Amino acid sequence: VAPFPDKSTWAIGAAGGMQQAVAKLLYNCGRNSTCSMKEPETEFSEILSSIRSDKGLTAPTASGKPFRLTVGLLVGVLATLLGDNSGAGWVSAIDVLSGLSPRQLDETKRTAAVVAVLNSACHALNNHTWYTYGTCIGTGQLAEDDDMPSTDAFIEMNAIFGQDSAGRWTVEDVVHQWRAINAEYGTVGSVAYIAQMSALFNWPTVPTPVAPMGNPTVPALIVGNLYDPPTRYEWSQKMHEAFPSGSLMTWQGVGHCMLDTGGKSFDPQAIKKCFDKVLSYFKTGKLPPNGFVCRETQPLPVLIQDRSFESRVEYSTDKEPLTI
């Protein structure tokens, strides 16, 4: 996290983290000849244009009416998939984007990809609301988890950030800042900013902010992921500045936080090297060299059949199962 947190910092950090994650996703696809998207950056732009077009990208509801996919829903689901630190969710993200691409000539597959995104984002009380009611209601709107995948309502996090972080804005203030974020971080970053800021900008209590974090003598070990969607790497660097007697260790991998995945990772050798140094620090207090980098030894997979583990995110429609 950032050592000097306020509500705007959280939201802008989410913008930067998500922009970096999607850029990494497209870069990794582009340098792998087996990736299903042959021009990933161009195709991603084409997908966003298709969603915004008059025709849009749609899937039928229970009543048969077309339900439009939005850019915000797509970016939100990508954030969930790219938060997977095993790498499996990153493969699923490419599969979703490949299905949505205008270069996907099979309309059935494109509709299935739309359904996958809508099912992930628009469910509450164990019901796919977009399909049943023709409107997208998610667990976040109800502040209540259900039993479906991608169920975190984030009410606990929003309550803590809302109470413990300073800052209050009007709607006009947020829109003004959103325009600046959109100019700097593009569509992906601006969606992430709004997703965070919309919950916090006018939190209905007077904040009780925590003091800035940091200590010049505490030998803290700070660990940062290069491609963590909600937690931008720059925050790890700033946190190390706040604890100058400590060390910053960087994991070149992906996903939210650096976790011991028990071997369930696209690169278990690299993650173990990082995690062993964390355990050594806990046991002995010995810090790794400042700036130590746990380097990737395996590339991120881009094909479903090449991933070692299933994605944590699964989808299904009311008519047929769909797992990506």
Image: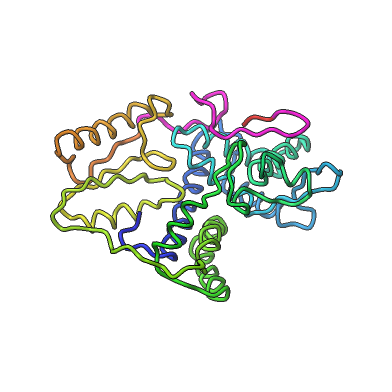
Q: What is the number of callouts on the image? A: 0
Identify the residue at image location x=44%, y=36%. 85
Q: Nearer the viewer, residue 126 or 50?
A: 126
What residue appears at the point 51 percent right and 60 percent down from the top-left corner?
193
In the rendered view, does 177 fall on the left or right side of 65? left
Majority secondary structure of magenta residues: loop
From this view, report whether residue 97 is shown above or below residue 301: below
Residue located at (64% from left, 38% from top): 98
Left or right for 150, reference 31: right
The quadrant the N terminus occupies is: bottom left
Assess whether residue 302 is covered by the magenta stretch: yes
Q: In this picture, is 11 found above or below 311?
A: below
The structure residue drawn at horizontal position 28% and vertical position 63%, both measured from the top left corner, is 212
Apparent side of residue 75 relative to residue 6 in the rendered image (left or right): right
Q: How is the image coloured?
A: rainbow
Q: Judge from the rendering whether residue 235 lies leftward or rightward of residue 50; answer left or right.
A: left
At which x and y percent is residue 149?
59, 36
Residue 230 lies within the magenta run: no
Image location (x, y in percent) of residue 322: 68, 30
Q: Which residues are drawn in magenta? A: 297-321
Residue 111 falls in which quadrant of the image? top right
Q: Position of residue 2 (x, y in %)?
A: 34, 58
